[in-house]
Image: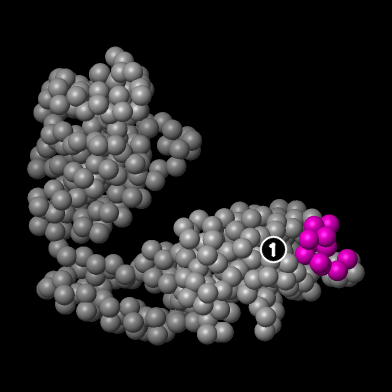
Amino acid sequence: MKLAEIITIGDELLIGQVVDTNSAFLATELNKLGIQVVQITSISDSCSHIMKALDDAINRAQLVICTGGLGPTADDITKPALADYFGCKLVSNETVLGHIRTLLAARGVIINERNIRQAELPESCEVLHNSAGTAQGMWFQKNDCDIISLPGVPYEMKAIFYEELEMRFRERYNLPPILHHTVLTHGLPESKIADMINDWETNLPPEIRLAYLPSPGILRLRLTGRASGSIEELKTRLNQETENLIKLIHPYVFGSNDDRLEQVVGELLIGKNQTLSLAESCTGGTISAMITSKSGSSRYFKGSIVAYSNEIKTAELNVSPYTLMMNGAVSQAVVEQMADGIRRKFQTDYAVSVSGIAGPDGATDDKPVGTTWIAVASERRIIARVHNFGDERSRNIQKAAITALFMLREEIIDCL
């Protein structure tokens, strides 16, 4: 199997100013091709660090991909560092210069000296065309290792990967067929799921592996198959093992692969020609944002009210002041009235309401931080459940939103 290493370059990564999404993308795409990433390293904008990182990586891997430091400013030093490392000089590439002129003209930008210098590339590299920007990719070779340098701007890096690299990797390397299938679950922690599927996991065939990928509110179970025979045989085996897994945990499964819970809910509502409204308190509009992130959500989503204060709960959602006084805003009675109020106000088939203590303050002895009530209302009934999501505010909000959508999904399916 081909082994790869990823090196991300930039001081902004090391001080936490920019989140490194490039490594996650590259690792995912390389793995799909059957190229195993053995290490990911982040380094500063320093010639000595770049050279040391390359020396180390070449000893571990047959493919090294670097991102970052290819821009037009003085702190972008990757290109001259690579020229020094490979013992060559920077030379102007007329084809690249023509591309830069055309691209900047189309954007209404007057080309300057810094832009022109971006056409200067190490003479020993193979140029990887960047259709999305001015910083070109570069492909070098040393000691039977392929070294590739890509821009740090994510959409430019992705453009070069898809347009220049993916097919070359397939043609250049004898890559084994590899397939993935991810089962998406909600409602049980990783340890509980692991107990439920232990016997099945223990008896998986050697060509199929399982990975647990937890995130707030969702646990992804990814099956990876590597073929020793034909790709069709692997596909059949992977599909069978996926079915076996789902049978063991089906009440907690809501989708697969790239499905999103809000998308799954939206498709169910479209299928039934039904509508949804939301009344959010502690989630502050998070569920509404998730729902409307999907194109076409206007077909089923009528709207929402963020009823953060008790005054809005009573004035807009018809929550009883007496109920609030006797039970508090974070209570079964209040979320039930919130859900019923928004459903009637917006005249929808379903409504979801959420009220909780996201934290870090607001807790009481009987309602610690993370206590959250969620209700789902329809014409036939209102259901409500209480949860405790923990003591970290942002995670509480995210978990509450996911749980609310999962409860809605369950209720829609139950009515089918």
Residue 266 or 368: which is nearer the viewer? 266
Residue 369 in sight from this viewpoint: no
Q: Secondary structure at mark 1?
A: strand
Q: Which residue is mark 1?
A: 279
Is 206 in the magenta?
Answer: no
Relative horizontal placement of residue 89, taking residue 106 as reference (left or right): left
Q: Find the magenta span and give its range.
A: 310-321
Query: Farthest residue toward the top?
Result: 113
Query: x%, y% of residue 276?
Result: 60, 68
Q: Amino acid at mark 1?
A: Ala
Colour style of the rendered protein structure: one colour
Query: x%, y% of residue 368?
Result: 74, 63
Q: Residue at x 13, y 54 (%)?
A: 170
Q: Residue at x 42, y 37 (%)?
A: 13
Residue 351 or 54: which is nearer the viewer? 351
Figure check: 401 above or below 248? above
Figure check: 7 above or below 190? above
Q: Quadrant of residue 318?
A: bottom right
Residue 304 in sight from this viewpoint: yes
Q: Residue at x 29, y 49 (%)?
A: 26
